[in-house]
Image (cartoon, rainbow, N blue to C red):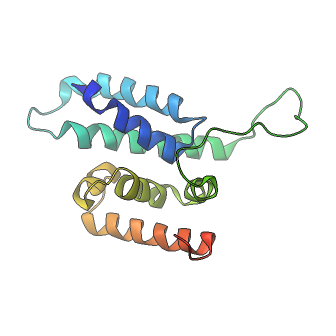
Amino acid sequence: MLDEHRDEVHRFLVAAAGPNDADDCFQETFIAALRAYPRLRPDSNLRAWVMAIATRKAIDHGRRRSRGPIPVAEVPDRPAPAAEPDGDPRLWRAVRELPPLQRAAVVHRYVLDLPYREVALALGCSEEAARANAYEGRKKLRAIMGGTT
């Protein structure tokens, strides 16, 4: 049953955590989901449940990455280009600069086109807080992009 949502979860994680970290977050999400699945109530919304796990994994991954240096054997002459999701690479970089809850709200609402009720479930907050995070995220994106979003 979880396989039905794998593509959507991966799309979310590419947008929220970046193309380089999405696979790690994806694996962490499904490992956590499989461990918790036996305790899931039969009437639960499986899609919202697994998206909530993915959201938390993306936020946790971002926090872990921001806490420590990235070790490398030697500094390259120039960085290798990272594969970006479809669309404007500058916009995706701006999305990843948003605070974690705003980034997750923006991706859930505007990339995955989830209603605010499901965004709230994924973020573990009220619908009003989900709306506020999406609004503040959009506002910051407009400022970063110079009013073009």
Q: In this view, does 3 lie to the left or right of 87?
A: left
Q: Position of residue 70 (x, y in %)?
A: 75, 36
Height in image: 109 above or below 1?
A: below
Total tally of numbered discs in the picture: 0
Q: Position of residue 77 (x, y in %)?
A: 91, 37
Q: Position of residue 88 (x, y in %)?
A: 58, 55
Of residue 19 and residue 102, the one placed in the foreground of this image is: 19
Q: Residue furthest left?
A: 43
Height in image: 122 above or below 131?
A: above
Q: Residue at x 35, y 50 (%)?
A: 112
Q: Residue at x 62, y 70 (%)?
A: 144
Q: Which residue is drawn at 37% across and 71% down?
A: 132
Q: In this view, does 54 lie to the left or right of 69?
A: left
Q: Residue furthest front?
A: 87
Q: Name the quadrant of the N terminus.
A: top left
Of residue 34 and residue 17, the one placed in the foreground of this image is: 17
Q: Residue at x 43, y 40 (%)?
A: 11
- The quadrant in which residue 42 appears is top left
Q: Position of residue 56 (x, y in %)?
A: 41, 43
Height in image: 130 above or below 24?
A: below
Height in image: 19 above or below 74?
A: below
